Image: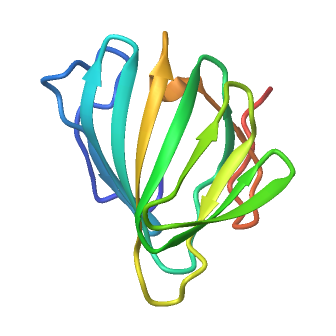
Amino acid sequence: MEGKVKLISRNSNENANSMMFEQNSWVNFTVLDIGAGYKVKRFEILPLKQLSFPKNRFHAQHWTVVQGTAKVTVNDQTFSIKAGETIDVGIGEIHCVENPDNSEILVFINVQCGFYMAEDDFIHFSDKIGRIADAV
């Protein structure tokens, strides 16, 4: 992944004692906690940047915005989620989160729940900044 600064322990054998941090040109995220059936991540999305368009096969997500306003797309619906507000993303739903602000970093907490939450659970679709879709 181009632009990546740091990656610690990114594999499907993660446990509550391992910490994962990733930083690149549009997002930073840290795994805060992992347990049986859940994973908690903190995301920082830089101004005017977005995450890719994936869907998850085996886990659902609950997002809480803690700073800024997120533009969230779930399937074909778009929502504006402000600090203190939440949104749920179900298993199999195509989703994306964007930071529409030109100066403030968007921060949100992502709680994943399911029986499998490794990074390879995400099936990625093409997005507007040119990342390539996974073979489906």
> Which percent across, then down, holds residue 6?
25, 52
Q: How many labels does the image show?
A: 0
Which residue lies at the image location 57% right of the left edge and 79% below the top edge? 48
- Residue farthest to the bottom, as pictured: 103
Q: Quadrant of residue 15?
A: top left
> Which percent across, then down, holds residue 115?
49, 9
Q: In which quarter of the image is residue 84?
A: bottom left
Which residue lies at the image location 53% right of the left edge and 72% below the top edge? 69
Which residue lies at the image location 40% right of the left edge and 76% below the top edge? 105
Q: Nearer the viewer, residue 45 or 66?
A: 66
In screen coordinates, is 32 left or right of 44?
left
- Residue farthest to the right, as pictured: 76
Q: From what the image shows, is residue 85 above or below residue 42?
A: below
> Which percent across, then down, holds residue 99?
56, 72
In screen coordinates, is 121 left or right of 132?
left
Q: In which quarter of the image is the C terminus?
A: top right
Q: From what the image shows, is residue 20 above or below residue 90?
A: below
> Which percent across, then down, holds residue 52?
64, 52
Which residue lies at the image location 60% right of the left edge and 16% below the top edge? 58
Q: Nearer the viewer, residue 88 or 25?
A: 88
- Residue farthest to the left, as pictured: 17
Q: From what the image shows, is residue 97 above or below residue 105?
A: above
**Which coloring applies here?**
rainbow
